[in-house]
Amino acid sequence: MQRMELLLTNMSARLSHVEGQVNNTTEPPMPEVPTDATPSVTPMYSANKPRHSLDHPDKYDDSDRSRYMQFVAILYAKLTVDAPAIGGPYEQLWYAYGRLAGKAQTKVYPWMRLHGNVNTVTPATLEAFFAHLNVLFEDHQLVEKANLELNRIRQGRTPFQDFISEFERILLLAGGQSWTDDVKISRLKTAINQEMRRATVGSDMPKQYEAFCERLHRVANDLEELKRIDNIQSRYKRNTSRPLTKGTSPDRGQPQVMDWTPAGLPINTVRTDNCFRCGKPGHIAQYCPEPAPLRRAPSPRNRGKKKHDTFTRISNTGVKENETESDTGSDSTSESKE
């Protein structure tokens, strides 16, 4: 009996111990929820997107179709370089559409309404967008005109730097960016002037178009330097060929100063209002109070028949008066004086 009681006592003690452990076990605390918590919204664009590397292309409004090919090239480069900053195909498609304006945007809108769904846009949709732009805005006559102009263009006296810029513009309009290098080099050789062509004769010119243009730039710079040196030498020769002595006669090309002073008159009486008879101001020789000087009339060749000498006096009225002096009178006067 004692043994049974001992077993029951031990069993009850164990049960009490187990119940105490069960009562003392606690559940892990639940996380506290802040009362001011708001549901987070995932933004469409991540704040860690890179910045744009290229500037935004100018908008195209279909007012000048000669600008279309340049616009498409810049827009395609923008979507390629800044694709991480713009986003996926959907964002790129609507970005490209946003670079249109005016009539151009109005013409493309029906296509965008049909293919610009966010669930259907793929990279192939973006390529189809550019193909649709070419159908609407590419001027096929402009390409033909550019080809004709490319055949006619010549450098002439135009500096090579200005000429190559115009040549590249026409080449782009003619679709020459897809031509092979030998075709573009052949067109450029035909267009440069004779001086540039002579400077490249015998030179090992590059076969690539870009390298060929770079070589022509160096040739043009060398020719400009030679012209500058020749001009300096020619100016130096002209300056040294002129004599430096004081007795150098004037050049034939320079007019000489003419002396307008009448012969036989004092210099100080020229271009004045003085009387030619007495030299006094205030009147002219016709009204001069001084008597006119005597002038001997021309005598005949036969002096033996000469009876008298004739003198001419100019009166105050301007009328010539002849005075005759006989030889006998002069002789008698001389005898009486003796």
Image: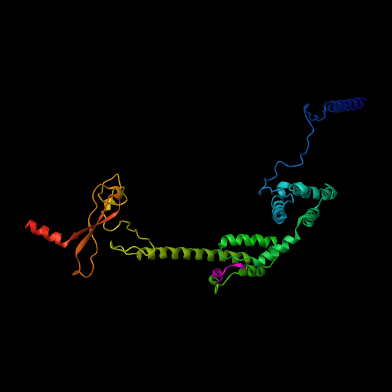
Q: Nearer the viewer, residue 82 or 133?
A: 133
Is 319 colored magenta in this rendering?
Answer: no
Q: Position of residue 131 (x, y in %)?
A: 79, 57
Picture quadrant of residue 165: bottom right
Placement of the C terminus among the 4 image quadrants:
bottom left
Does residue 55 appear left or right of residue 91 in this picture? left
* Residue numbers of the magenta segment: 191-197
Does residue 123 appear left or right of residue 71 in this picture? right
Q: How is the image coloured?
A: rainbow
Principal SS element in the magenta part?
helix
Residue at (62% x, 60% y) in the render: 166
Q: Nearer the viewer, residue 329 or 200?
A: 329
Picture quadrant of residue 141: bottom right
- Quick one: which residue is furthest to the bottom in this view? 202
Q: Nearer the viewer, residue 253 or 277?
A: 277
Above or below residue 130? Residue 252 is below
> How many numbered badges does the structure rendering display?
0
Above or below residue 77? Residue 237 is below
Does residue 158 appear left or right of residue 295 in this picture? right
Q: Position of residue 136 (x, y in %)?
A: 79, 55
Is 196 colored magenta in this rendering?
Answer: yes
Q: Position of residue 83 (x, y in %)?
A: 72, 50
Residue at (85% x, 49% y) in the render: 114
Q: Position of residue 176 (x, y in %)?
A: 69, 64
Q: Nearer the viewer, residue 169 or 28?
A: 169
- Residue 161 visible to an observer of this rendering: yes
